[in-house]
Amino acid sequence: MRLVDHNGDNRGVMATDDARGIAVEANLDLVEVAADAHPPVCRIMDYGKWRYEQEQKAKQAKRHQSTITVKEIKFRPKIDPHDYETKKGHVVRFLKQKNKVKVTIMFRGRELLHPERGEAILIRLAEEVEELASIESKPNLDGRNMIMILAPLKGVGEEKSEDEPAETPA
């Protein structure tokens, strides 16, 4: 086998027993790193420490990973102004939480004869939240539903730190 010592130096090709003896002298482990190579490559290392470091790297990567969820809010074409404002508030909250929002207009019966009313609601909503979101997919009629997806803009939803004073009205 080819041996690489704990300093990363190549010790050359040697017998397994000799490599095991060198690892025991250094009070470390003999680990096979490339079994498919000819001859196989083994390394002298502290295997427990190496595994611990790999686990810490995986935890760190998971901690910095961000997940984007898609929240859905449903409207009707004949929505009351107050209900519209309430649902718009939900959309704003979702966008500030850095979630994508799927806005759906549900048509029933003869409402389907006037899809432009649903599209007008979606466009109005997109214009009112344009400082928070961009349209990822434009309003699209899918059966009895019209769907639009809003994606949060970069920098949206970042909370102010407690050190910064609150803005006072002038």
Image (cartoon, helix red, strand yellow):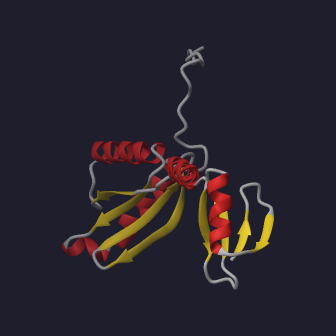
Pick the residue in front: 34 or 83: 34
Q: Position of residue 88 (x, y in %)?
A: 38, 46
Pick the residue in front: 167 or 125: 167
Indicate whether 98 appears above or below 76: above
Residue at the location (22% across, 74% down)?
110
Quarter occupied by residue 111: bottom left
Quarter occupied by residue 164: top right
Query: Which residue reaches farthest left?
Result: 109
Q: Position of residue 6 (x, y in %)?
A: 71, 56
Q: Quadrant of the C terminus?
A: top right
Seen in the image, is 144 located left or right of residue 89?
Answer: left
Indicate whether 161 appears above or below 151: above
Pick the residue in front: 22 or 51: 22
Pick the residue in front: 19 or 47: 19
Residue at the location (77% across, 59% down)?
8
Number of numbered discs: 0
Residue at the location (21% across, 70% down)?
108
Seen in the image, is 70 located left or right of residue 40?
Answer: left
Q: Position of residue 133 (x, y in %)?
A: 53, 52
Q: Position of residue 140 (x, y in %)?
A: 42, 74
Residue at the location (57% across, 51% down)?
57
Q: Quadrant of the N terminus?
A: bottom right
